[in-house]
Amino acid sequence: MEVKTATIDEEVEVLMSGAEYGDPETKEAMRRDLRERLSEAEREGRPLRVYCGYDPRTADLHLGHTITMRKLRQFQEFGHDVTFLVGTFTSLIGDPSDKDKAREQLTREQVEENARTYAEQAFKILDRDLTRVRMNDEWLSTLDFADIIRLASNFTVQQFLVRENFKKRLDAGEPIYLHELFYGLMQGYDAVAQEADVQVGGQDQLFNILIAGRKLQQGLGQKPQVAIIMGESLPGTDGDIKMSKSLGNHIPLLAEPWDMFGKVMSVPDKAMPIYHKLILGWTPAQVEALEKGLADGSLHPNEVKMALAREIVSIFHRPEDAEAAQKRWDEVFRSGGGSGIPEDIPEETLTADERVLDILRRLNMVSSGKEAKRLMEQNGVRLDEEPVSDPTLVITLDMLPVVLQVGKRRFVRLVR
């Protein structure tokens, strides 16, 4: 990747684009800090140390995560030292940000299995040769209780309890567990351990980066990092709520080309502009032209969406995969009047009678039993095109072969 040549002011303009903090004074302070940090690094003849953390709570990253990755890529393009940090230790607790209840705690084995492919997924956006990959158990697992006490003495309980999600739970009489307060402390120490100049994150990370990280660095004698907080979140396939694995409205980076294409096609038309902006990096002028074309009818929403789906599949797979996904989509939804079963679907052999629910989970066609039941309530699970409403339904060997379908795009033929 060729490093871009730019003035400090030009770098600041690009690197601060899309950043929002909830108040203009903080944004101006971060802009000023970034300019000063760039000037200082230039005098010292070194790149900035920049990172973003990703907790492997699940096995796959999704399109929403690529927003911060694209910001990291911009730093790479200006020649800065970028770290893709995998939260192998912070994941054991889970970030309580914007959660109305405590997260389920994972085991170390679950985290390690989930983290196995994180870097490979990230390299779809980041430059493999210029990305430093680190795991935060490298430093967090070595802290002893005396270290925790020393770090915790930099904060008050009130600083944590004023966070909106904690305040809501406190007002509602819902429990706030002590270990949840440690998350901000641990993420703050990530910045200290790496002597970070800049940390990138989403809006849900405002407290962890802007307050916990900067304050802990300052308390331990380091210059507080610049916080680059991305202002917009990518809506999920519902078009409204932020993309989230737990809500089931996400598009995984590991999704098969056909499934990824179909999930993009399911996104409501109203979300097209922000997908082009955040995923494809379109300029404000390009997005404005798109919105105008959709409004005056010169652009057909379905054609725009198919072009978007092809481009996204091409980014995370290959152009030929995008073409094949488009062809399959046309066969199922255009020639078949909106329904039908593709010919080239995978087969799975059953050796014994098995519940539909267990098959769905075993084949990773759903992320949980809860999701499977929700889909069944919405007629989203079908057996030979007939809706399945009973999660206890057993598919017997005598019923085979049958086609099991989830949503409009995921199929498997069950055979003996």
Image: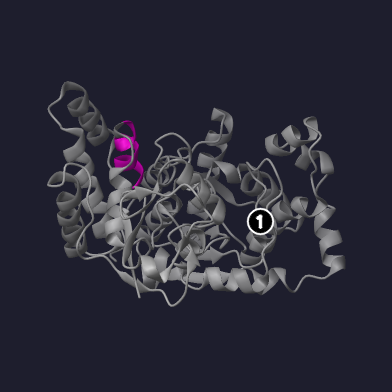
Asked if 10 appears above or below 171 in the picture, the reply is below
The reply to whether residue 243 is in sight is no
Q: Quadrant of the N terminus?
A: bottom left
Q: Position of residue 189 (x, y in %)?
A: 69, 60
Q: Give SS at disc 1.
A: loop
Say how many tags the image has: 1
Residue 323 can be seen, yes or no: yes
Task: Tell me which secondary structure the magenta stretch mostly adopts.
Answer: helix
Apparent side of residue 69 relative to residue 139 in the rendered image (left or right): left
Task: Name the residue at the top extreme.
Answer: 296
Quadrant in which the C terminus appears:
bottom left
Read off the residue under disc 1: 94
Residue 214 coordinates in the image, percent (x, y) = 67, 50
Residue 166 in the image: state x and y as whole percent: 74, 39
In percent of the image, x 53 and y 34: which residue is there? 28
Numbered range of the magenta stretch: 270-279
Answer whether residue 274 is magenta in the image: yes
Q: Residue at x 82, y 51 (%)?
A: 178
**Which amino acid is tagged 1?**
Gly
Tell me if residue 200 comes above or below residue 286 in the rendering: below
In which image quadrant can residue 91 be found? bottom right
Q: Is residue 168 left or right of residue 17?
A: right
The image shows residue 292 at horizontal and vertical percentages of 21, 25
Q: Residues within 10 Å of mark 1 (few under 14, many from 20)?
A: many
Residue 301: image quadrant is top left
